[in-house]
Image (tube, rainbow, N blue to C red):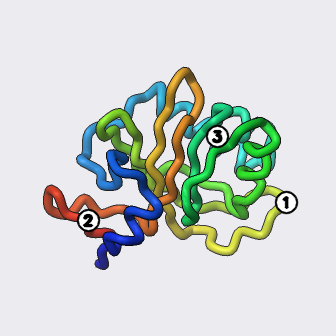
Amino acid sequence: KGSIPEELRRQLIPDGVPFLSTGEPADPDELEVVERWLAALTNADIPAAADTFADGAKVQNLTTPVVLADRGERITFNRSFPCGAEVSAASSVEGYLIVIYRLTDRKGSGCDGPGGSAASTIKVEKDRMTEWYRLPNPLDSGPEGSDEIS
């Protein structure tokens, strides 16, 4: 186990955005949006994957957060993922989902880590993702208030 260095966490995850699971069940309607996104991504339907994000969505994939202003930027962001994925765990935390994925091959792309895992914190509003933050490693809830990751 390691921990997210505080400086890195502040750069990647805005204040107020949870990054640890509490074990609360995921909201099924919000989780359905994420599963629809992953199915489109895995099947290389990048436009459909992009359409699960709202215009103005805030995202980061281990970069500083950016805003996806329009559909073209949403398509570019989704095209950047080399892998597909399936949800392996999800929970609701303070109005967000924390999702852990099992990476899969993506049709027409060279996934560099099938079978590996990744995690993100996601906010879903009105059937679209409005915030998506990649977490440095899949989460381990650890002790309450802990920032331990596995």
Residue furthest to the bottom: 2
Q: CA distance from mark 1 to mark 2?
A: 36 Å
Secondary structure beneath label 2? loop
Residue furthest to the top: 126
Q: Quadrant of residue 52?
A: top right
Q: CA distance from mark 2 to mark 3?
A: 27 Å
Secondary structure beneath label 3? helix
Asked whether, in this view, residue 85 is left or right of residue 148, the answer is right
Q: Nearer the viewer, residue 19 or 23?
A: 19
Q: Who comes first in sequence, dot 1 or dot 2?
A: 1
User: Three-letter amino acid code at disc 2?
Assistant: Asp
User: Three-letter amino acid code at disc 1?
Assistant: Gly
- For image coordinates 78% across by 51% down, the residue present is 76
Asked whether, in this view, residue 74 is left or right of residue 8, the answer is right
- The percent coordinates of residue 24 (x first, y second) are 26, 39
Question: Which mark lies nearer to you, 1 or 3?
Answer: 3
**Residue of label 3:** 37
Asked whether, in this view, residue 44 is left or right of residue 25, the answer is right
- For image coordinates 71% across by 68% down, the residue present is 111
**Residue of label 2:** 147
- The percent coordinates of residue 128 (x first, y second) are 59, 29
Q: Quadrant of residue 26?
A: top left
Residue 150 seen in the figure: no
**Residue of label 1:** 108
Q: CA distance from mark 1 to mark 3?
A: 17 Å
